[in-house]
Image (cartoon, helix red, strand yellow):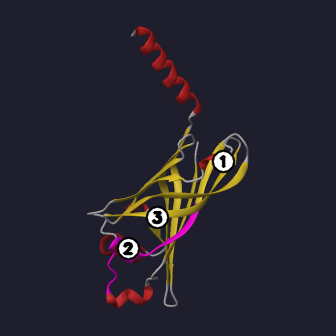
Amino acid sequence: MKKFVTFLTLSVFAISAFAQVYKTSTGTVDFISSTPAEDIAAKSSKVKAALDSKSGVVQFAISVNSFQFKKSLMQKHFQENYMETSKYPKSSFKGKITDSNAIKWDQDGIYKVKVKGTLKMHGVSKVITIPGQVIIKEGKPTLKAAFTIKPTDYKIKIPTRTASKIAKDVAINVNCACN
């Protein structure tokens, strides 16, 4: 039994030695809702992200209050009326790179990927597939993605009086340099 425990311990150590988890707490997410009436844009530089190079698992978490707008009134409406941050303070994504074997983690390069996972926002969880890039530079990955979401898919209510100012599809950009 003692030999088995020793073998199991060494096996776990050997497996974990090949896995690398990269993290950041200063990633960025920005979004823009563009309509003929108005562009509404915001950015957060407080995105927490983690990437496991062995499994291809990717996780993101963001405090919805961390988004900054050019106009303080837009920020207030976004937080209180649309995203209801007192009820839903965080948004998150957990997924897996579907083709992580194509990434050469020890070789600088730009690798196009797709990540399939669950985006949770405004209390709604939805499985989505996001196209993106893993950029390896000097052994460190940067995760980039650009995709759109529909606020209605996440039960974000848009008042009729402002509906012409909010796009049906909101463009989201992610940029997370990990260590």
Residue 147 magenta:
yes
- Picture residue at 37% right of the left edge, 77% below the top: 152
The residue under label 1 is 103
Q: Quadrant of residue 139?
A: top right
Identify which amino acid the numbered label 1 is placed on. Ile
The tag earlier along the polypeptide, 1 or 3, is 1
Q: Is residue 150 above or below residue 95?
A: below
The mark found on residue 47 in the picture is: none
Q: CA distance from mark 1 to mark 3?
A: 21 Å
Q: Start and end of the magenta stretch?
A: 145-159
Residue 164 magenta:
no
The mark found on residue 128 in the picture is: 3
Q: Is residue 84 left or right of residue 110?
A: left
- Picture residue at 53% right of the left edge, 54% below the top: 27
Say which element carries label 2: helix
Q: Is residue 155 left or right of residue 100?
A: left
The residue under label 2 is 153
Q: Are marks 1 and 3 in contact (CB under 8 Å)?
A: no
The percent coordinates of residue 11 (x first, y second) are 51, 22
Give the residue furthest to the left. 87
- Picture residue at 30% right of the left edge, 62% below the top: 88
